[in-house]
Amino acid sequence: MSALSIFTGPLATVTLNRPEVRNAFNDEVIAELTAAFTQLGQDPQVRAIVLAAEGPAFCAGADLNWMRRMADYTHAENLADAGQLAEMLHVIYTCPKPTVARIQGDVYAGGMGLVAACDMAVSVDTANYCLSEVKLGLYPATISSYVIRAMGARAAHRYFLTAERFDAVEALRIGFVHAVVPADQLDDKLAEITKALVSASPNAVKECKTLLHDVAGKDIDAALIAHTVEGIASIRASDEGKEGVQSFLQKRKPSWLG
C-alpha cells in the first residue's frame, strides 16, 4: 500500500497515510513525497497543495525500523540517505505552487522539517511539537535550514538545544505555525487560507514564491534593489499582470477566476 494518498485538482492534497507508525517517514515515504510534490508542482491544473496526515499524529519523524537500519550504515551510506531527505525538503520548499501544512496532531523531529518546508501551517490546538534529536545523541542538521527560517534563530537556540516539547500556542507565538484552532475548526481555517491562494493570479503566486526565496534575509543593497525593480517591471508587463490591473480598473473578475 502506498505511504501517501494524493488528490489532484485546483486544490491538491497529499496525505501521509501511515497512522499505525504515527506517519513516521522512511526511504519509501521520502521518495513518494519527492515525486508527489515534483509532479503537482508542474501540473498546470494545480493552484495550491495541502500536506495532511491520517491518524492522531501529523508526523513523528524517522521510522524506527529505518533508524535501526541506519544504525549500521557507513558514513557514505548515511550521506546518500541524508541526501534523499534533503532533496525531499528542498522540493517541497521550492515547489512553484503554494503549500499549506494541515496539522491535526503531534509533530516531532523530522516532521518539523516537513512543516517548516511548507509556506504556511495551520494547527489544531492539541498538537505538540518537539525537536527531539539531541536526546538521541543526534542533531536536526538536515531540517535545520527550514526550521530556523520558520521559527527564528532565537527560538531555535532553545528548542534545538533542550529538545523540550512545546504546544501549539507556543508554536504560534514563535511563528512556526500561522493559525491554531480547535479540531472542529481546522478545515474551515484551512479553507479560508486555500480559497485566498486559488483566487490569486497563478503566475503572480509562482513569481512571489521566487521573490520570497530571493529576498528573505538578504542585505538591502544595490543588487537586491535592482533585482526587485526588474521584478516589478517584468510582472507589470506580463499577461496576467496586465489582465489583473485592467480587471481591477474595470471592476470585473480577472480571467483566471473564469
Image: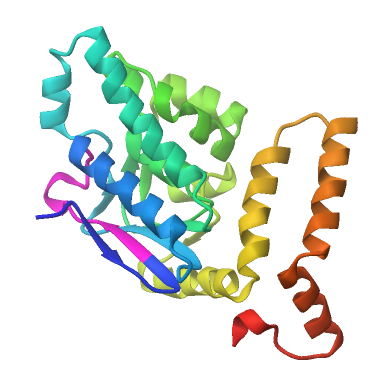
* Residue 124 visible: no
Task: Give whichever of 71, 137 is nearer the camera.
Answer: 71
The residue nearer to you, when weighing 87 against 44, is 44
Image mark count: 0
- Look at the picture and state if 65 lies above or below 196: above
Q: How is the image coloured?
A: rainbow
Question: Which residues, given as a range, are shown in magenta?
Answer: 13-25
Q: x%, y% of residue 41? A: 45, 56
Front position in the image: 140 or 215? 215
Q: Residue at x 82, y 45 (%)?
A: 228
Question: Vertically, is 248 above or below 82?
Answer: below
Residue 200 visible at all? yes
Residue 114 included in the magenta stretch of the image:
no
Q: Position of residue 209 (x, y in %)?
A: 62, 51
Q: Residue at 26% across / 41% down in the picture?
A: 31
Q: Residue at x 34, y 34 (%)?
A: 110
Q: Position of residue 230 (x, y in %)?
A: 84, 48
Q: Is residue 242 above or below residue 222?
A: below
Quadrant occupied by the C terminus: bottom right
Query: Residue furthest toward the right?
Result: 222
Residue farthest toward the top in the current orientation of the protein: 75
Which residue is nearer to you in this view: 202 or 212? 202
Q: Position of residue 59 (x, y in %)?
A: 28, 45
Q: Is residue 139 left or right of residue 25?
A: right
Q: Is residue 199 left or right of residue 236?
A: left
Q: Residue at x 75, y 31 (%)?
A: 218
Where on the picture, by quarter, is residue 165?
top left
Quadrant that contains the N terminus:
bottom left
Residue 78: quadrant of the picture = top left
